[in-house]
Amino acid sequence: MALDDLMVSRAIIDEYSNSLKDSLDVDVAIVGGGPAGLTAGYYLCKAGYKVSMYERKLSLGGGMWGGGIMFNKIVFQEESLPVMKEFGVDIKKYTDNYYVTDSVQMVGALVYHTAKAGLKVFNLMSVEDVKVTADNSICGLVINWTSVEMGGLHVDPITIGAKYVIDATGHACEVANIILKRIGKVLYTQSGDIMGEGSMNAEVAESLVEQNSREIYKNLFVTGMAANAIYGSKRMGPIFGGMILSGRKIANDLIVKLKQEPVLVK
């Protein structure tokens, strides 16, 4: 059967436009497609909620792809094994409490299972600002193409609505920084500011990342490395159990909140 080049273009434009229009109003918007953000999206979508993700780069997975110093193996601890097994990745026990998996396989599994659960992903998309209510509660995002940002072009963005927003942007804490710039030092930290991450200490960082994954401003939650950076904790390097557990924890926290509200139709 002959192929029509214009039909290919129509199919891409129609289906992407439909997906974008359907995601203009969601239960949760996740900014950043690293392991914590993907895990949060997976559990939220599994629970039946309408969730979209905005990733400024072409690929998802954050820093997980490169493992440590471009050796594409990553380490997990015992506590995270149930979640790892849920994603179906091959796991090798290295020694007590140290488990190794292939970083490429892990990213592929995370992306596949999260997409199959219903997460709508918009890559090459940057968040310029947050949408707020009269009392500055977060109620959505202001988005634009990453290429517009990179090119320094004067092109206006569009807005999406969300009951809750998750900052899963890693070390950069991008959404938190928008709050500081636009609203002021209002974060739920001792100073109201981003406290900044400390030097490497995997034991401390892994033990605190779940605890630090919580609401940091009105309707804005944080997960993953951004959580430790905001609350002044240590960094952990190429061990990713905390990232996965952090994503699951923030999803569970939001599921509790969302159960008290009407579910948007997927």
Image: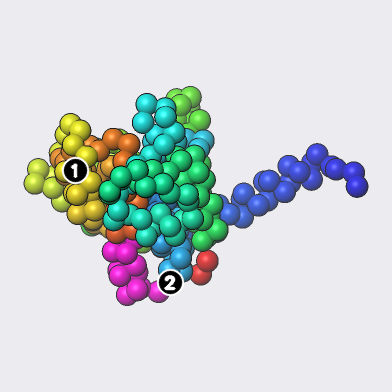
* Residue type pointed to by label 2: Val
Which residue is more in the foreground, 244 or 146? 244
Residue visible at 49% across and 39% down?
Answer: 104
Which residue is more in the foreground, 155 or 77? 77
Q: Is residue 227 above or below residue 84?
A: above
Residue 174 visible in the current orientation: no
Position in image of residue 118 (x %, y %): 52, 60
Q: Is residue 142 above or below residue 137?
A: above
**Which residue is denoted by mark 1 in the rendering?**
203
**Which residue is denoted by mark 2 in the rendering?**
263
Write the start and end of the magenta stretch as one range. Answer: 251-263
Position in image of residue 248 (x %, y %): 34, 58
**Mark 2: secondary structure:** loop
Position in image of residue 86 (x %, y %): 44, 60
**Mark 1: secondary structure:** helix
Q: Is residue 256 magenta?
A: yes
Query: Mark 1 Cα within 10 Å, few/some/many (few <14, many 20+)?
Result: few
